[in-house]
Image (spheres, rainbow, N blue to C red):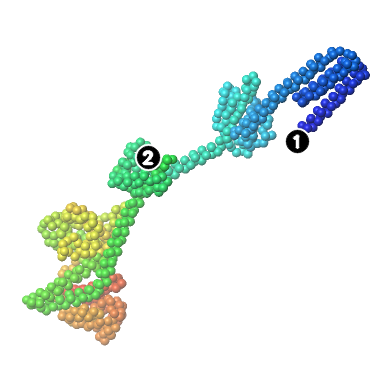
Amino acid sequence: MIEIKLKTKKEKVKIFIMIGLLSFALFLNYYFHFLLHSSTVFTHFFYIPIIFACIWWRWKGLLVALFLSLNMIFYQVFYAHSFGSKYDDLLTHMMFIFVAFLIVGLRRQTDKAEEETKTWHENFSQIFNTTGNGLVVIDRDFNIMQFNDMFSNLTGLKKEEIAGKKCFDVFHCAHCHTPNCSMNIILKGKDRVECETEKERKDGSKIFCILTATPFRGQGGEIVGIVEDFKDITYRKSAEAALIKSEERYRSFVKGIRGIAYQTDINYSPIFFHGAIEQITGYTEEELIAGKPKWNQIIYRDDLPAIYKSLEKIIKSPCYSCEPYEREYRILRKDGQIRWVRETVQNACDKSGKPILIQGILYDITERKQSEESLQKCEARFLHAQKMEAVGRLAGGIAHDFNNILTIINGTSDLLLDEIKEDNPLYFDIEQIHKASERATSLTNHLLAFSRKQILQPKILDLNFVVTEMEKMLKRLLGSDIELLTFLDNGLWRVKADQGQIEQIIMNLAVNARDAMPHGGTLTIRTENVTLDKDHCTVMQEARPGRFVHLSVEDTGIGMDKDTLNKIFEPFFTTKEQGEGTGLGLSTIYGIVKQHEGWVSVYSEKGYGSTFGIYLPALLVKKQVAFKEAVSRQDFKGSGERILVIEDDEGVRSFAKRALEKNGYKVFESSNALDALSLFDREYGDFSLVLCDVVLPDLNGVELVDRLMAKQPRLPVLMCSGYYTNQKSQWSVISERNLHFIKKPYNTYELLKAIKEAIDSSNNRK
C-alpha cells in the first residue's frame, strides 16, 4: 500500500508539471502568433512537453506528443491560411514526431534491460540467501563485502554486526593470520581450497565446517577477493565423535570382559574375534582370524556333534524370531588343557531375511564347572553321611535293649557251660548258643562302631608297636600264599586312640585284602608322618590342614571299579558271595576312624589292587604303650566281698548275681534307686563295691552313686550301660570322674575282671 501511494503521488507531480508546461506553451503560442505575428519561435516550446511525455510515460506519452504535434500543425495550417504564409515548418514538425517515437522506443529497450537486471539481482539475492551454506565475499584486505543470511546464522551475529568488519573478527579459526589462510592460498595461485575447519561463534561455542574458497575476480579478470562457502558439519562431527566414543566404549567393554565376542559366517569362517581370546584359548586373534586353527578344530571332539546340531538349528531359524541359544561345551587350548566355555549365540540376516552371520559371546566357566563338580561330590558325601547317620541312630536306638538281652544269653550260657561237662549231650547245644551270642555281640559292636556310637577308651599309642604286635597274628590270618611287608617310620608321631579299635581296623583291612587276593599276593602296611596344607586338602576328600599319622594298607588284589568305590562304606554292602560276609567291615572302619576325628582315603583300580589310607591326628609326645599280661578267671574270684548290684533289668540282674555268688562274692540286689538307697542304709554302707546301671527308672545311675559316695566316700563303684550315646551313657561324666565302667553285653570273665580291677584300684588308693 505504501508503494502504491508513493507511485500515485509521483504521477500526480508529473501531471502537474505537464499541465504547467502545456499551459506555458499555449501562452507563448498565443502571444507570438496573435500578438507578435511570429511562427518561428513558439513551435520550439512544444518540444519540451513532448520529450518529457515520452520519457515519463513511454507509449502513453506518444499520445501527448501526437496531440501537441497535431496542435502545432493545426495552428501552423490555420496561421498559414489566415495570414497567407507558406507551409515551410511542416516538415520540421513531422521530424519532431519521429524523434518522439524514437525516444519512446529507446526508453522501452532501456526499461527492458533494467527489468532484466533487476530480475537477475532478485534471483541472485534469493539464491544467495536461501542456500543451505554460509556464503561470504571478502576483498584482498579481508573486509567482508557481501554475505548471506546463513553466514549470519553460522556466526551468531546480526547483519549490522558483520557489515564492513574483517573476516577474522567475525568468524575466527586457527588458520587466521597464517600461511594456511584460504586468502593467502588463493592469492598464491590456487584455484580452489577445500578443507575442514573449526570456527568460533560470537558466544564462544565451536562449530565444524567444510570450507570451500574460490577466487573472486574483477572485470579485468584480476583477483579482487575470495568467495568462501561454509557447510555446517557440526552435527556430523558430533555423530562421528559419538560413534568413535561408542566404538571406544565397545572396545573397552569387550577388552574388559573375561569372555570372547565373535562373528563368523554360516560356515564358521571367522570375521572377527575380540576379548580375552588368548587367555581362554591360548591362540592369538590373528591366528583365529587366519583360520589356524579353525574354531571347530579347537572344540573338544566329543562335544562337536551337539554343537553342529545346535548350529543347524540356529541357521534354519527365521531371523528376529530366534531367541539367543545358550550352550556349554569344552575346548582344547593351545597348550593342551581342556576348558569349559558357556556360549550365547544368535544368527544375523540380510535385508531379505536370509541368515548370513553367526554372532555371540562366550565365557570361560571352568572354575564354575569345577565348583559344581565339587558341590556334587559334597552333596553325595552329605547324602552318604545322612544315610550313615540314619543307620547309626537305628543301631544306637536298639543297643540298650539288645545288649541287655545279649548279656543275659551270653552270661547264662557261660554259667551253664561251667556247670555241664563236655561229654554232656547238652554241652554242644549250649556252646552253640554261647557262640551265637558272641557273634551277635560282635555284630552289634560293628554297627555301633560304624555309627560312631561306641564308647572309646583312648590312650596315647604308637601305631608301630600295635602293627608289630599284630604281625604274627596277621601272617597266620593271611596264609602262606600272601606275603606281609611292613614299612614303619622310626620317628612316627603318637596318636590318642582306642587300641582295641585300631587293632580292629587293621584286622578288617587285612581280612578284606586276603579275600581280594584268592591266588596270593602281597599285603603292605606302612606308617608315616604327614603334614597337610590347604592345597592338599583340595584334592583329598574330607581332609583338613594339620599334622597326622598315616597308616596305609595296600594289596595286589583284584581291585574295585568306580561304582563299587562309591558304595564300600555303606553298611551291609559286600562284594562277597551270600553268607561269606556281613558287609560291615569297611563301614565299621569308617565309623571308628571318624570317631577318632580322622578320615579314610581309598584308591583302587580294577585289576590293580587297592590302597586304604587311615589318617589320625598326631600327638607330638613320646610315650611307650604298655600291655598287661593275660590272667586266668581264678585270679578274679572273690573271697566273700559284699557287692551291691543295682540293675533294672531282671534277667541281667539275675545273671550278675549268680555269676558273682558262684565266684566267691556275696551279692545284694536292687532294681531301682530308691530300694538301693534303703538297702545301703540298712547295711550301713558295708559294701566292697557297687555295680550300678547308668540308666534306672527312677534316678540317673551317676546321681545315685553320688548319693552313696556321699555316705561312704571311698566306696568302689563300677558303672555299666547298654547305651552308647553320651547323653544316655553319661560317658563324659564317668570318664571325667575316673569311675570304672563296663559296657554291655558282658560275660562272666569280663564282669569278674572289671570288679576285681575296681576293688584293687580302690585298695591301692587307700
Q: Quadrant of residue 525?
A: bottom left
Q: Which residue lies at the image location 30% right of the left edge and 61% below the top edge? A: 383
Quadrant of the image for the C terminus?
A: bottom left
Q: Is residue 586 visible?
A: yes
Q: Which three-letter amino acid code belongs to the residue tagged 2?
A: Asp
Considering depth in this image, is 546 or 364 the residue closer to the camera? Answer: 364
Q: Which residue lies at the image location 16% right of the left edge and 64% below the top edge? A: 578
Numbered circle sitting on residue 2: 1
Instruction: Assign a secondary structure to mark 1.
Output: helix
Residue carrying label 2: 265
Q: Is residue 51 above or below residue 128?
A: above
Q: Which residue lies at the image location 39% right of the left edge and 44% below the top edge? A: 347
Report x, y in % for residue 251. 44, 41
Q: Which residue extends farthest front?
A: 81
Q: CA distance from mark 1 to mark 2?
A: 74 Å
Q: Which residue lies at the image location 75% right of the left edge and 22% below the top edge? A: 104
On the rendered structure, is 477 left or right of 304?
left
How many neighbours does mark 1 have within 10 angstroms: few (below 14), some (14-19), or many (20 or more)? Answer: few
Q: Is residue 335 above or below residue 162?
A: below
Report x, y in % for residue 762. 24, 76
Q: Is residue 9 above or below residue 359?
A: above
Report x, y in % for residue 701. 28, 77
On the rendered structure, is 294 left or right of 213?
left
